[in-house]
Amino acid sequence: MSGQQPGQGRARGRGGRGRRPQQPAPPGQAPEPAAPAPQQPPGGAGAAPAAPVGRGRSRGARQADPGQAQQPVVMPQQAPVAGLGPEAVTGGRGVQRGGGRERPTAGGNGDGGAPVSQMGQLSLSGKPEYRRRAPYEKYVEKRYKEDTKACVGTIGNKANLMANYFEVRFWAEKKIFQYHVDFKPPVENHRVKHALIASLQNETGTVQLFDGGILYLCRLLAKDPMVLYATRTFDNAKIEVTFTSKGEVIPASPQFLQIANILMKKIQISLGMKQIRDHYYNMNQAIQIPRHKLEVMPGFTTSIHKYDGGNLLGVDIIHKILRMDTFLEGMYNLYDTLEMNRQLSTFQEVCYKNYVGSIVLTRYNNKTYKVDDIAWNMRPKDTFEKGGEQISYVQYYQDNWNITIRDKDQPLLVSRPTERDRRRGDEQNLYLLPELCTITGLSDQVRSDFKVMQDLAVHTRIAPPQRVNTLETFARQINSNEEAQKVLQPWGMTIAPKVVEMQGRELNAEKLLVKNPKEKATMEISYDIQYADWSRNMRNIHLLNAVPMTNWLVIYPSRCGQVAGELSDCLIRVGKGMGMQIMQPCGVEITSDRNESYLQAIRQNLNPQVQMIVTVVPNNKKDRYDAIKKSCCIDNPVPSQVVLQKTLSKQQGLMSVATKIAIQLNCKMGGEVWGAVIPVKGMMIIGLDTYHDSANKNQSVGAMVASLNKECTRYYCKTEYHDKKAEIMQSLGVLVTGALRKFHETNQANPTRVIVYRDGVGDGQLDAVFQSEKEQIEQAFRMAGGESFKPALTMVIVKKRINTRIFKRAEKVMNPQPGSVVDTFITKQEWYDFFLVSQSVRQGTVSPTSYNVIFDESGLKPDHLQQLTYKMTHLYFNWQGTIRVPAPCQYAHKLAFLQGQSLHREFSAHLSDKLFFL
């Protein structure tokens, strides 16, 4: 790492500990791949701290050290080694994570020499104290429903549905004994613990499950407590292991679910699947897409929990997307591209921008790491101390993994310790070799490539019949595989061969409110429930409340003059059809597309009468977009629209594009497009979501969007900043107070019911939301209306990232129709929850959304709450169809995303009653 003092490292495996010696490079010789700033011994002349490095994925260029001059980048003039793809890397059993972590020490000389790193044994002492959760606690759900309250609805047509769950049964008479395990001296490394327990199988029995602290057996031990001795292999130390009985495990206990989930992991291993992080994949079934140098690896995610339908095994198909080339080959390709464009001086900067923050997989141990930095001044030839001797990375991988490192001049990748690592006492960095790393996932640039995503969809978007067939084949494989049955049978666990079936309900298509163009009065329209799309029904229909746009600006560079004129003409024409009066704009032509040119044009032409600023930009440069949005949302508050020249280039689709833009313009000025028929009066609906700020890694943006009228077409929005680690909005009371006062100002009355849809919360945060955010909202009631103001509050947690899939069984297995509700069988016993399929998809399997009502004093029946939720999925004005979550949640997400990605400050209060962020 440029400018960082090298230090003592640490490897997650066998080996000694020590410090790196100072190893100067030959005089006048600089490392080939990069010429880093010279390093000095501590306290020496020219010593400088490391440049700050962010941990986010969208990390920009590194901040230059003012005390160091940037030297030109030189990559080795050699072609990448042929055949260096993932298939050339061998794997095996081992405990090495892939590199050493560092500690401060001296290294290098003032000539930019090649410093060295070292690996050491995982520290087994000095671990800080922190609260340990029992391993089975995640299977214990807090109760969020009243026993006397009905949680199941009745409205709608009954439907025969299926879900991606399998019934799990246990032998009622099966006895499982639980033992607490103590090690003396203490052992912290889980791998070492498991090895010690495995060496004692002659005394404890071969049928056992161990989670690191608790040992589960199918028979009683001879003594209680029982003391045995095992030998730790890497240092031949004698470890005293004490087994203390904690009683039997009954099938109704949460420990039983923990045992079942541990068994599922063993089953997938017995089926030949490989673990990558928390999931298992069929590496021998990987599908290669050579055209895009991508590889799709199929796998399964499994989890056994207790539901209304009993103990169910949830299984879903997942995919790990890998690059077929290595990290090093990607760097060489980038180098060749920059060399061709004569931009080699920016190589390090572009590497940081493209690669830092990415997740890589090391094939030799199937583990993933986050790349936090690139150590340009380190090489595979560098040495570290292992077993009291110096050994190079090259020799280490040859001896331990039988891997020959081909490029001896590649820099090393740095993976910093995670929060979990720090809790274990691991504070050093890990070093990885780019030659052995494969990038996982897709970059934003790849995701924006339609052809790549289309080719990937063939393998990742699986239709319902194929998905059900794959899941049931997996269950049959478990029941027929001899090795899998050897794992299951001793514990008395069986898995059903078919997915579960249950009764669901289908809600009718909703009625939407629009304006009749002839009578100028409100009218209702509907749509085809199968497609949940009313774009055709909106033709020749006026917007519910169209705001005349009589004074607006169009700012465009000279080369975009023609498309800017065509856009203005199309907007005027489509506006007439929607009942929206759009006058000719004031055109502002700028000589260049630099950021300052746009900002200067905005400042010079903006006046209080301007309703909207439309800017036409030649490309989607993020810094230009951010500059325009900051100017129009903070410095010079006015609704704004940024339009890409590429979007306006196709003549045949220009009217359609103009229609969508006109709808957005109307919303941003405070207009209404369509509404929903909501019979309940005096109700305010709030959507909450959070987003991590890309400029400040330690903060998150919390966004609130609250409805102001009965039809939920007008909104008040506000944001706040809170600590990223907390995840809980800390100024929610202030936000809700402002919304309540705006509601009273609009309606001349306070709301009688407040329904909050909270997005962006995991199951582990439910209690924190319930305790903290609920109290903040109730405090806002008192601040806005006094002690006597107590509207009925309902809090609903919205979860999109779930593994549940729902299917409809008709003549064939198919996606359920929009409006399908499931509130039994696959719902939690302790929760008031339901699943809703609100949208229609053309490819693959539709994903339901989970709604968990953690607090409810509204007096609404389950039917009413489910119908209201479905209605709210119709009110997102950027799409003429239903969406996956209630519209206030989607609006809150859009607002938090804009502020976290572009603004990085709170927007002007002048825009708080408009959907300016669409």
Image: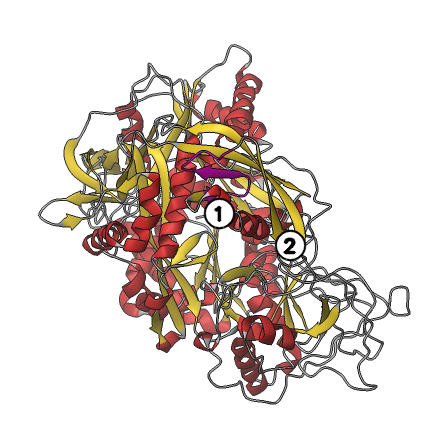
Residue 567 visible, this orientation = yes
Q: Nearer the viewer, mark 2 or mark 1?
A: 1
Residue 600 against residue 732 in the figure, above or below: below
Picture residue at 52% right of the left edge, 78% below the top: 329
Type of amino acid under label 2: Pro
Type of amino acid under label 1: Asn
Provide residue 268's location: percent of width, then percent of height: 36, 53
Judge whether residue 188 is colored magenta: no
Residue 367 against residue 479 in the figure, above or below: below
Residue 866's label in the rendered image is: none
Q: Which residues are magenta?
A: 209-222
Provide residue 389's location: percent of width, then percent of height: 74, 70
Q: Which residue is mark 2?
A: 417
Q: Which residue is mark 1?
A: 202
Mark 1 residue crowding within 10 angstroms, few (<14) / some (14–19) / many (20+): few
Q: Nearer the viewer, residue 784 or 357?
A: 357
Q: Is 740 on the left-hand or right-hand side of 835? A: right
Mark sitting earlier along the chain (2/1): 1
Q: Nearer the viewer, residue 695 or 75?
A: 75
Q: Is 29 on the left-hand or right-hand side of 618? A: right
Check the image and name the residue furthest to the left.
811
Judge whether residue 218 is colored magenta: yes
User: Distance from label 2 to label 1 (Cα)?
Assistant: 38 Å
Where disc 1 sits, the SS reads: helix
Picture residue at 60% right of the left edge, 32% below the top: 730
Residue 580 visible, this orientation = no
Viewport quadrant of the N terminus: bottom right
Provide residue 116's location: percent of width, then percent of height: 74, 72
Q: Is 19 on the left-hand or right-hand side of 218? A: right
Where disc 2 sits, the SS reads: loop
Residue 265 against residue 436 in the figure, above or below: above
